[in-house]
Amino acid sequence: MRDFSELTALMERVVHKYTRWEDKKRTYGTEVPLSKAEIHTIAAVGDHTNINITALAEVMGVTKGAASQMIYKLVDKGAVEKRVSPDSDTEVVLNLTAAGKKNHEAHAAYHRQAGDKALNLLREMPEPLLESMAEYFEAFEKVIDEGLREE
């Protein structure tokens, strides 16, 4: 029987450190400092024109409440705007402001360059290892989703 205690301890340590890292702020094309969660929300809104909160939450893998709270922050920071949907008077859609578009473009440029060390690690990995990692994370996500539904 295999002992996974070291691997699970490592995974927990990485998750905790990633959470701290996600809170670190940096600027992306404007002078407004943004956390990783904020810039990734901006990226999701930028990649999905006229997205609503429900769809944004799905794309990001968070609750509607968490997505809504993040959008309030980004509206206050001038990166996202909320409008009535062109398709329905009862639905609100999200889009980037001019500042949000600058953030989105600067974030995309950051990922295209060699500045993202985490992406560089992935770029250097052999394809079979990447495929195995993707399979593991998809299965792990399902386990987490099941655990969250039980709450």
Image (cartoon, rainbow, N blue to C red):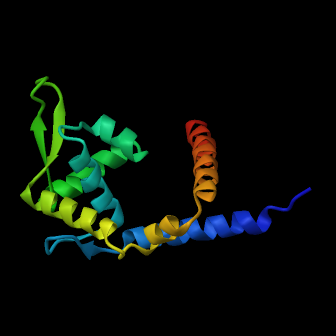
Q: Nearer the viewer, residue 2 or 121?
A: 121
**Residue drawn at point x = 35 percent, y = 65 percent:** 36
**Residue drawn at point x = 51 percent, y = 65 percent:** 122
Q: Is 96 displayed left or right of 58 in the figure?
A: left
Which percent across, then down, holds residue 134?
57, 50
Q: Quadrant of the N terminus?
A: bottom right
The quarter of the displayed image where residue 119 is located = bottom left
**Residue drawn at point x = 62 percent, y = 42 percent:** 147
Which percent across, then down, holds residue 87?
13, 23
Q: Is 145 displayed left or right of 91 in the figure?
A: right
The quarter of the displayed image where residue 146 is located = top right
Q: Is 68 displayed left or right of 21 in the figure?
A: left
The quarter of the displayed image where residue 50 is located = top left
Compared with 151, 42 (above or below) is below
Q: Nearer the viewer, residue 49 or 63?
A: 49
**Residue drawn at point x = 21 percent, y = 70 percent:** 28
Compared with 11, 131 (above or below) is above
Which percent across, then down, holds residue 121?
51, 70
Compared with 46, 145 (above or below) is above
Q: Quadrant of the C terminus?
A: top right
